[in-house]
Image (cartoon, rainbow, N blue to C red):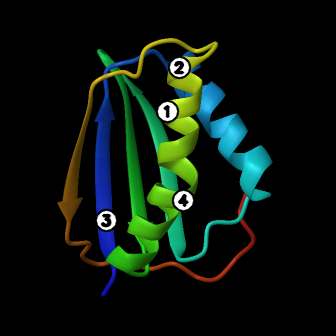
Amino acid sequence: MTIAIRTRVAADAEWYDTVHAQILKRSGGHAEGLLVHVGLATADGFEILEVWESAAACEHYNQTVVAPLVAELSAGHVGEQPEMTTEELEPRGLVLPRAPVVF
């Protein structure tokens, strides 16, 4: 079942840009099961909205790629891991023609 995930992060857009660039570098721009990823700057940090083919695909990618990278960067040159809140949503009216990923 398709799911949407909204993550709010209390960090500046530079933190997002650093993490996003490293994820792209390490994954080759491929995330099995990811349909949409959008990062948005907000007044108090940034927000990520993702749509996944399944909860299992989302959990696997976050556990094997995102979480280890965030932990590594937080312990190293980027600084302390920012506060994050994540919410699972049920997408409605989603239309996604298959196309190459653009970054």
**What is the three-letter code of the residue carrying label 1?**
Ala
Q: Residues within 10 Å of mark 3 (few under 14, many from 20)?
A: many
Residue 59 showing in the rendered view? yes
Crowd class of label 1 (few under 14; some 14 to 19; many from 20; radius 10 Å): few
Q: Secondary structure at mark 3?
A: strand
- Residue drawn at x 53%, y 44% as measured from the top left: 68
Marks 3 and 4: which is nearer the front? 4
Residue type highlighted by circle 4: Thr
**Residue at 79 percent of width and 45 percent of height:** 25
Q: Sequence-wise, which precedes: disc 4 or disc 2? A: 4
Please report contact status of discs 2 and 3: CB closer than 8 Å, yes or no: no
Of pointers 3 and 4, the one earlier in the residue sequence: 3
Q: Is residue 29 left or right of residue 78?
A: right
Residue sitting at 40 percent across and 43 percent down? 48
Report the residue marked by disc 1: 71
Badge nearest the viewer, 1 or 3: 1
Q: Secondary structure at mark 2?
A: helix
For label 2, the residue is 75
Q: Earlier in the sequence, mark 4 or mark 1?
A: 4
What amino acid type should be assigned to the residue bearing mark 2?
Ala
Pointers 2 and 1 in contact (C-beta within 8 Å): yes
**Cβ–Cβ under 8 Å for marks 3 and 4:** no
